[in-house]
Image (spheres, rainbow, N blue to C red):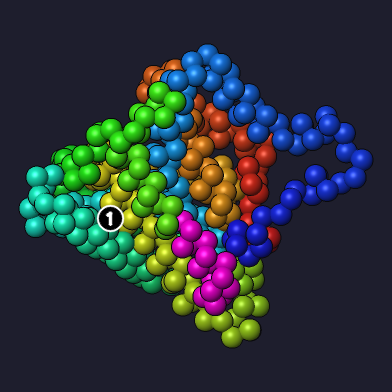
Amino acid sequence: MEAASLPETGPASRTPGRSAGDFVLDNILWVILGGALVFFLATDFTQTLVDIKTGLSNGTIWALIALGYTLVYGIIELINFAHGEVFMIGSFVAVSVWQTFEVSAASSLLVIVGSMAVGLGAAMLVSGSLNVMIERVAYRPLRGAPKLAPLITAIGMSFILQNVGLLWRGTPDSTPDLIRSQKEVFTLLDVTIVRSDIFAVAVTVPLLVALLWFVGSTRYGKAMRATAQDPDAARLMGIDVDRTIGLTFLLGGLLAGAAGMIYALYNGTIQFNQGFTAGLIAFTAAVMGGIGNLKGAVAGGLIIGVIQALGDTHAGGRWTPVIVFGVLILIMVFRPQGLFGEETREG
């Protein structure tokens, strides 16, 4: 897990006597990504700024989901394929709260703000509890089993939850536009900032800061880092490893629920299979940034958001997934540990 030790400068950069060519070779991916960005800025400056703005606001949602993947993988080295569906359930819960209380954009400001807070809390609580239950029922009994067993179980849980979503809301459902998402707030460098952009960033950033503080500074965070580094040694030191793993799933679920609520208001629609696509993108972000690395997951989500926006503009939506996964393959070829390096135990 990333917080076990805050990212350090790569060993290559500390090696004395390295040439500029070696430095460029070590950072070839950053050079390529930066070069592509400069090219697009030179080609169409304003449109590229619009794409960056859209990509960053959309990428915050991927970052929140990606953190759940990287937290779980960092501590038990399991790809929790059900995480995307936990995110979907979070969206459904938030929208159900608003529909139950018949909240709409025409409601008073106090009602809208209060219902959004209740929706966010309910989505986080249900998704967090669901993730803990999944770990307790489906993954914990397989602790010590061959890695393929929990992996298959995770895929099974994903399909189960997806069918729960299908039974709950079988068709795409629109969400009340509580934030008037496309209303212009201000313009900067000819780029229009709308409410949905500010909303996504305003909700996501405090959650990311809180998570980094929790993992990096609290006693429970230290237990998570110790368990991620060596569960057996952590157990010998008196750490309740099972409880710590459960706490990790709880945190991942809370973030997925928050992402689900943001997604519902940001996109305006929800559907039972949204978790599959979002989960795939978020897992790609976690791998791109360096699986197990918290800051890498955030950066991966933002980078993928920008790549998607640029792909939609210059190549069309049909080719965007090809571009995203093409970049991922490029990164894996040149830097298998991800852009910021993996933070997982060896073995």
Q: Position of residue 321 (x, y in %)?
A: 43, 29
Q: Does the segment drawn in magenta span residue 214?
A: yes
Quadrant for the C terminus in the image = bottom right
Q: Where is residue 139 in the image (x, y as percent from the top left)?
A: 43, 66
Quadrant for the N terminus in the image = bottom right
* Region rendered in magenta: 208-223
Would residue 100 be found to the left or right of residue 59 on screen?
A: left
Tell me if residue 146 comes above or below residue 159 in the rendering. below
Question: Residue 98 appears in which quarter of the rendering?
Answer: bottom left
In front of the other: 137 or 57: 57
Q: Where is residue 319 in the image (x, y as percent from the top left)?
A: 42, 22
Dominant SS of magenta comes to: helix
In front of the other: 106 or 103: 106
Secondary-structure class at tag 1: helix
Q: Position of residue 33 (x, y in %)?
A: 60, 29
Tell me if residue 26 comes above or below residue 312 in the rendering. below
Task: Identify the amino acid type marked 1.
Answer: Gly
Image point 63% across, 65% down: which residue? 4
In front of the other: 329 or 4: 4
Q: How many other residues sit within 10 Å of disc 1, few (<14), some (14-19) or many (≥20)?
A: many
Instruction: Name, please, the residue furthest toward the top.
Output: 43
Would residue 122 be found to the left or right of residue 210 on screen?
A: left
Query: So how many labels did they put on this image?
Result: 1
Image point 76% across, 31% down: which residue? 24
Q: Does the segment drawn in magenta span residue 226?
A: no
Tell me if residue 201 comes above or below residue 46 in the rendering. below
Q: Is residue 123 visible?
A: no
Would residue 256 be found to the left or right of residue 117 on screen?
A: right
Would residue 245 be found to the left or right of residue 124 on screen?
A: right
Tell me if residue 154 comes above or below residue 58 in the rendering. below
Image point 51% across, 37% down: which residue? 303
Residue designated by label 1: 90
